[in-house]
Image (cartoon, rainbow, N blue to C red):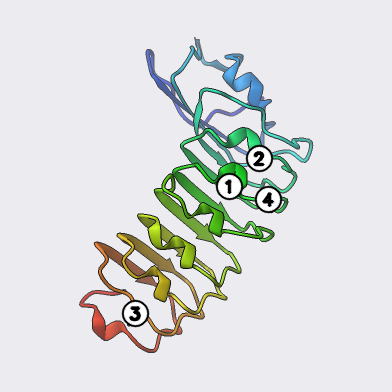
Amino acid sequence: RERILSKVKDGSQQIALKFDKKYEVPDIRDIVAHKIKFGRHYSHLLKYVSLQVYYLPPTVKEIPFLPMLEDLELDNCVNIRDFSSLSHVKRLDLSDATHLTDLTPLQNIPHLTLTNCPNIQNYSILSNKHQKSLSINRSAITDVSFLRNIQEVLLSSCDQLVDVSPLYGIKNLLLYGCSSIKDISCLGNHHKLTIADCRSIERGYECFRTVR
């Protein structure tokens, strides 16, 4: 009943699983317990596990601790209440995590993407030496001063964000569809700066040679 959308090669040290919401998602424990059949193959003990689950059934309330897991993408996390079991992963992408309020369990994840997580109370805890890249999408965030020490930052559809001056000096900065930003003249000293679909910008384009 599972539909596996990606392929696994013999002897692979990496596995990527994608599940379509039209099909029943197997228990995540079963994935790592090597109970899912890939044609004539079975998964072996892997050093690196990457999971992409596009639909979590309402019955899934928590994510078990999976020691081999390093890369996880979870969509439709509306019923997940405890994220502490994910504190060890290297890359995490969460969407629609409406019960996520405290980022403390996730503060040491080097690469973190948060999409439509409306109840996060304090982002500033992510400002630490462990954070390499951070993507925040569809958020009501207004204060981005905590981002100044992060190497790569993507802000998308953050419609209440006005002041981007704290983002000065970030090595790789991407701003997409942030409709309230009006002045980008404060930005500079970026190795890479990408601005797209921020339609309210009135000042600062003249400071850059190529800004979309």
Q: From the image, tell me which residue sits under label 2.
A: 83
- Would you say the residues marked 1 and 3 are in contact, meaning their CB atoms lie under 8 Å apart? no
Q: Nearer the viewer, mark 1 or mark 3?
A: 3
Q: Quadrant of the C terminus?
A: bottom left
Q: Nearer the viewer, mark 4 or mark 1?
A: 4
Numbered mark located on residue 181 in the image: none
Depth order, front residue of 31/123: 123
Residue drawn at point x = 45 percent, y = 84 percent: 200
- Would you say the residues marked 2 and 1 are in contact, meaning their CB atoms lie under 8 Å apart? yes
Mark earlier in primary sequence (2, 4) = 2
Label 3: which secondary element: loop
Mark earlier in primary sequence (3, 2) = 2
Note whether 25 is above or below 117 in the view shown. Answer: above
Residue drawn at point x = 38 percent, y = 18 percent: 12
Mark earlier in primary sequence (2, 1) = 2
- Would you say the residues marked 4 and 1 are in contact, meaning their CB atoms lie under 8 Å apart? yes
Spatial CA span between label 4 and label 1: 10 Å
Q: From the image, tell me which residue sits under label 3.
A: 186
Residue with the most extreme right position: 59
Disc 1 marks a residue whose amino acid type is: Leu
Label 1: which secondary element: strand
